[in-house]
Amino acid sequence: MRNMAKTSCPRKGAVLFAIGHPGSVIGCSTLLLAIACLLLALQSSAAPQEKQEKKVERRIEDSAEFHHQLGVAYHLRRCLDDASREYARVVELDPPRELNEREWALVRRFAPRVYVTSSEPFPLRDFAAVLHPSLRLIAYHFFWEDDIDFPEDNDPCDHEVVWVQYSTDGATLEKIWTYFHGRILEGLSAAVEEGRRNGMRARINVQWGKHGSMPFGWEELSIVADAGDAESKYYPLGTPISLQRYNEGLYRKLAGEGRRLAAHPLGERHGWPKKFTGTWNDFIDFSRRIEPLELLDKGKLAMASRWNSATINQYFLFYNFRPKTEWPVEK
């Protein structure tokens, strides 16, 4: 494991904030405006009476939601001590809880089936689950050893997420979403049906080296590529394309030009492949199964909470991870 990068960071009023595609950053004034807007929105719903404003402001500024958003903002800027301090306050205000027997059964029942290519270079080092305490949602977190394109990012893992929605009686898989390079893919009905045919466990295909998670039937899904994608010159930008075309562009990049920073010392030292050496059919041959339940049974990294990032930081992992989208739907 590489050491986490220490960043010299300003205090709360001057933190920077990252939004959108990984790597896009905006300044502290925008963050302050965003926090102000959050406070105003929460205040307007919580206390319309003017005489309660100061009391409500104090209450909102000490809410779990406020501290979690601030923690994620610090985290995205690699202000790790500050992020952990905010996450600690989150779990103090709204503590995660251990799963009961029924909830453990739910987490195991709907855990996805994971498939990689035969030459996948990185192992899955940890697997965790967060059960939403009031919605029928489970977030499954995958921590791969690294991302082939980012030897320099100071993240000692590649964090990916799959979410599932289950039926009211806890018996049936209803929906599937995956985190995919800053976007959320929703599985089509074919993906849900395929999961139901396989014990309610959705099939997730994982890109070679980069670990973008794709539901069954991924070829038919649509995506809008942008200039922030490492292989952006290999497909059209700003317009919907099929996920198959997107992956064809990724294949051409990794098989031809190769990975980013191919000469980086860390990639060299750890023997990372510089290119994908197989054919297109090899690139999409997701035939090697990885069983995440083995890691779940070993590590017991599962709790009930609204706050994924805070729970992972405070209860699950000793090493840093990049925070991702908390839940696929806002309710």
Image (cartoon, grey):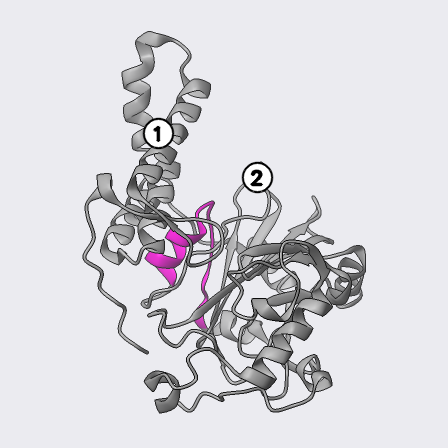
Q: Which residue is mark 1?
A: 36
User: Percent from the top left, x then y, of residue 18?
Assistant: 39, 50
Residue 231, disc = none
Q: Quadrant of the N terminus?
A: bottom left
User: Percent from the top left, x then y, of residue 52?
Assistant: 32, 12
Q: Is residue 314 magenta?
A: yes
259 and 210: which one is in front? 259
Q: Which residue is mark 2?
A: 330
Amino acid type at mark 2: Glu
Q: Quadrant of the C terminus?
A: top right
Amino acid type at mark 1: Ala
Q: Earlier in the sequence, mark 2 or mark 1?
A: 1
- Mark nearer the viewer, 2 or 1: 1
Residue 274 appears in view: yes
216 and 10: which one is in front? 10
User: Percent from the top left, x then y, of residue 176?
Assistant: 67, 56
Q: Quadrant of residue 41?
A: top left
SS at badge 1: helix
Q: Which residues are magenta?
A: 299-316
Tell me whether the residue at label 2 lies in contact with that at label 1, contact meaning CB atoms closer than 8 angstroms. no
Residue drawn at the location 32% of the way across and 55% of the way down: 77
Q: Residues within 10 Å of mark 2 (few under 14, many from 20)?
A: few
Residue drawn at the location 63% of the way across and 59% of the way down: 237
Q: Quadrant of residue 150?
A: bottom left
User: Percent from the top left, x then y, of residue 247?
Assistant: 66, 71
87 w.r.t. 117: above or below = above
219 w.r.t. 176: above or below = below
